[in-house]
């Protein structure tokens, strides 16, 4: 995912670009599901935290509950991780294959919770 520092948002947002306005402490991107909705994430003590160490991480997860798509994902180290499946996607929305050993703790935890809940149903 590319990061662009802007003062004001451009009229047309591009896929896989996180636009960050430090003046307005806000980040905006197009929904990662491809529905083209604009996702606004305020960067303050009550909103999201942006970390940049060679690639971008936005914390916490992004849950688009008010959109028709209802997508829910993480942006971690420049990659998109779908919260429902635990699958990781690159900037072209192609799934990244990885071994179970390379899964981060939150994907492993998510999978264990899903497994536990499915047994209770």
Image: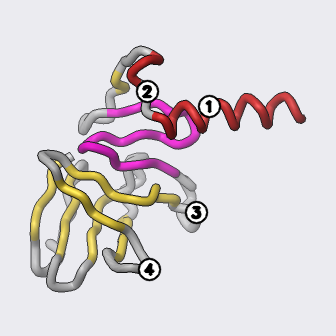
Question: Which comes before the other along the chain, label 4 or label 2?
Answer: 4
Callout 4 environment at 10 Å: few (<14), some (14 to 19), or many (20+)? few
Point out residue 57 in the picture as x, y percentages from the top left corner: 29, 52
Element carrying mark 1: helix
Would you place residue 106 above or below residue 12 in this image?
Answer: above
Residue 111, label in figure: 1
Distance from Cα at disc 1 to Cα at disc 3: 21 Å
Q: Are marks 1 and 3 in contact (CB under 8 Å)?
A: no
Q: Are marks 4 and 2 in contact (CB under 8 Å)?
A: no
> Which residues fall within the magenta stretch?
72-89
Callout 2 environment at 10 Å: few (<14), some (14 to 19), or many (20+)? some
The residue at which mark 2 appears reads as: 103
Residue 46, label in figure: 4
Question: Which comes before the other along the chain, label 3 or label 4?
Answer: 4
Q: Residue at x 38, y 66 (%)?
A: 39
Point out residue 109 in the picture as x, y percentages from the top left corner: 59, 36
Q: Residue at x 33, y 66 (%)?
A: 49
Element carrying mark 4: loop
Question: Which comes before the other along the chain, label 4 or label 1?
Answer: 4
Q: Are marks 2 and 1 in contact (CB under 8 Å)?
A: yes
The residue at which mark 3 appears reads as: 65
């Amino acid at each position: 995912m590319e990061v662009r520092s802007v003062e004001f948002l451009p009229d047309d947002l591009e896929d896989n670009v996180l636009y960050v306005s430090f003046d307005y402490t806000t980040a905006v991107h197009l929904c990662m599901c491809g529905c083209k909705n604009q996702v606004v994430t305020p960067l303050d003590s009550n909103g999201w935290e942006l970390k940049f160490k060679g690639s971008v991480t936005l914390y916490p997860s992004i849950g688009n509950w008010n959109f028709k798509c209802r997508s829910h994902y993480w942006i971690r180290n420049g990659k998109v991780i779908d919260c429902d499946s635990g699958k990781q996607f690159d900037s072209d929305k192609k799934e990244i294959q990885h071994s179970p050993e390379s899964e981060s703790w939150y994907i492993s935890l998510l999978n264990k919770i899903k497994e536990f809940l499915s047994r209770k149903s």
